[in-house]
Amino acid sequence: MVRFRWPGNRLEACATCRPGSFRSCGGKIPMTIRTDRVRILAGLLSFAVVTVVVAWHAKSSAAQKAPVTTYYNHGHIYTNDPAHPWAEALAVSEGKISCIGRMDHVLLDCGGGQEGVETVNLKGQFVMPGFNDAHVHLGGAAADELAVPLTGVPSAEEMQKRVAAAVAQHKDGEWITGGGWDHTLWTEKKFPDRQQLDAVAPKNPVILTHISGHVAVANSLALKRAEIDKTTPNPPGGEIEHDTLGEPTGMLKEDAAMSLVKARIPDPAPEARRKAIELVLENVAKNGITSVQDYSEWADFQAFQQLKEEGKLTVRITEWLPFNLPLNDLQNMRAQGGTQDPWLKTGALKAFTDGAMGSRTAAMLEPYSDDPSTSGILTSDPEKLTAMAIQRDKAGFQLAFHAIGDRANRIALDVFEAVAKANGARDRRDRIEHAQVVAPMDFSRFAQLHVVASMQPSHQTTDMRWAEERIGRERLVGAYAWATMLKNGVPLAFGTDYDVEPISPFRGLYACVTRERPEGGPKDGWQPQEKISLADCIRAYTSGSAYAEFEEGKKGELKPGEYADFIILSNDLTKIPPAQFIKTRVIRTVVGGRTVQQAH
């Protein structure tokens, strides 16, 4: 580094950029430059100094080929760039950040404030990169808009009342769907059965999906439509629950079983699907989400394509594809959906290795503490999964495996290790979605295999009510272990698992730094050794998520050349107690320089 210092610290230059710019000092050095000293400098500086200035101007002009369209000033901007974490102003050109730093730098050197440039006075408001939710189900959330809402119902009786109300609005024989019920909230904490649904819906087929998405209850007419009776065998990777007489109870575990019924449900009309998706995307923008990594149906993706073509897409979407489809189909879908568009593209292949802990279908190495008769369900045969993974990896696909139990996580790691051995080294960034319970000796394998841990902090606040009962205190040491992941050098990507959990990333940040329930407690947090800092939490929700989808350098930080994806908040997250995170409002959401949501 070449340094020149005038007495009084009024001017300092480094060999990377122009004196007084944000890049030269990270905002630490006064910007005032005395004109007399500048004249002296012009006459006296050596060739090395000229080189410094020329190098900075080349960098600056390259970033400003396009004219500035919007200039944001008087802000408290958290960039998420460790080298230069804070700024006062930023300029936007062609949907990207062209300049960011001190106000006078952005104003004078980058074209902010010129005629025709929209100026937004932030009035000291807190700005940060938009959240990138690394795990959502937009199609599932849209389906919820068309179904009976059951999230938070306090009892099976209340669920029956809501189904009865839906029956009154449907003709006989029409399907009734619903989702979001959670038996762990009920006094009896038991799964419902078909008889409870038959009592209020004898003439309509009904299926209601659990909050986890991994089990559902169907009534007798729905089972009949699916041709499920006491003789129907369990499908591979799923379970049809039976009573003591051998009759199906109506409980269907995992997609292999649930799909037997759901395959009989007619698709929603295209206009109804689109309207529901638009409502979901509006909710996404209101919560400050500027990018998502989504697993929905192909028909949902086609609706996203239509919105993009009309210029109405308000969030960047990377769509995962179903791992189990034939390779030719996957390659065709990749070709149709593309892999490069900055707004909408296809991404990883999603596979399932197990279920969920709340329904005791997550695959564990040892039986459940509260039900020793089961250790969960493996939804994929490990040998078949490995063979298919090797084939799909060879075709250039990224792999994302759902794994919640410690056995499922170990199997996923085994598969990724076999893939690397078979196909050789490359930058795969294979992912484990959830990674909720990991055997202590397996954490280091995540780092060794360069596996991304894609986790959802809100799950911890939901599951802490019963997790110790399910798996015992000893296994909790490896549960929801964000700090342990970071200590082992594992890349973290955070999300919500929306529609399983609310889309709000602020709930996730609260869970991340406190490990407490939204209403408070337990004191000092649940398994508090796994708390991580707010900076690490934000990083996992932004640049960490971008890395997980090969988008680092494009989004996740506010710096020149990256997408102008940012949010303006009602609170400065770095200055308020965590309890205030959940009360924070998104004032404006900007994606690609375009305001897609603004609070009134």
Image: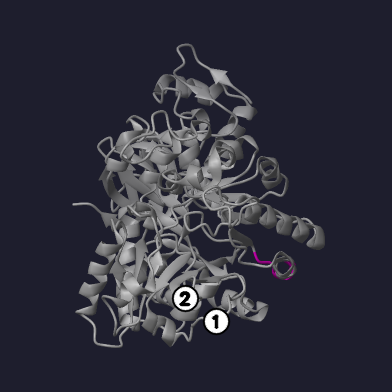
Decide which of 98, 437 is in the foreground and name it.
437
Identify the main secondary structure in magenta: helix
Residue 589 is left or right of residue 473, and the answer is left
Compared across the picture, whether 339 is left or right of 508 comes to right
Mark 2, secondary structure of its residue: strand
Position in image of residue 327 (x %, y %): 67, 77
Q: Which amino acid does label 1 sit on?
A: Thr
Q: Please tell me how crowded label 1 is: few (under 14), some (14-19), or many (20+) other residues with Cα within 10 Å.
A: few
Q: Is residue 393 magenta?
A: yes
Point out residue 385 in the picture as x, y percentages from the top left corner.
Answer: 69, 67
Residue at 44 percent across and 55 percent down: it is 66
Q: Mark 2 points at which residue?
A: 248
- Can you say which quadrant of the picture contains the N terminus? top right
Looking at the rendered structure, the secondary structure element under dot 1 is: loop
Q: What stretch is highlighted in magenta?
A: 390-397
Give the numbered dot on residue 125. none
Whether residue 289 is visible to the viewer of this picture, yes or no, is yes
Q: Residues within 10 Å of mark 2 (few under 14, many from 20)?
A: many
Q: Quadrant of residue 211?
A: bottom left
Name the one closer to the observer, 323 or 589. Answer: 323
Question: Per the image, is 359 magenta?
Answer: no
Locate residue 49, reporting x and y percent.
59, 28
Indicate whether 376 appears above or below 217. Answer: above
Q: Is residue 198 left or right of residue 46?
A: left
Marks 1/2 in contact by CB < 8 Å: the verdict is yes
How far apart are the two marked residues, 1 and 2, measured between alpha carbons?
9 Å
Q: Name the residue under label 1.
A: 232
Q: Where is residue 321 in the image (x, y as percent from the top left)?
A: 56, 70
**Can I make out residue 113 in this image?**
no
Residue 376, image quadrant? bottom right
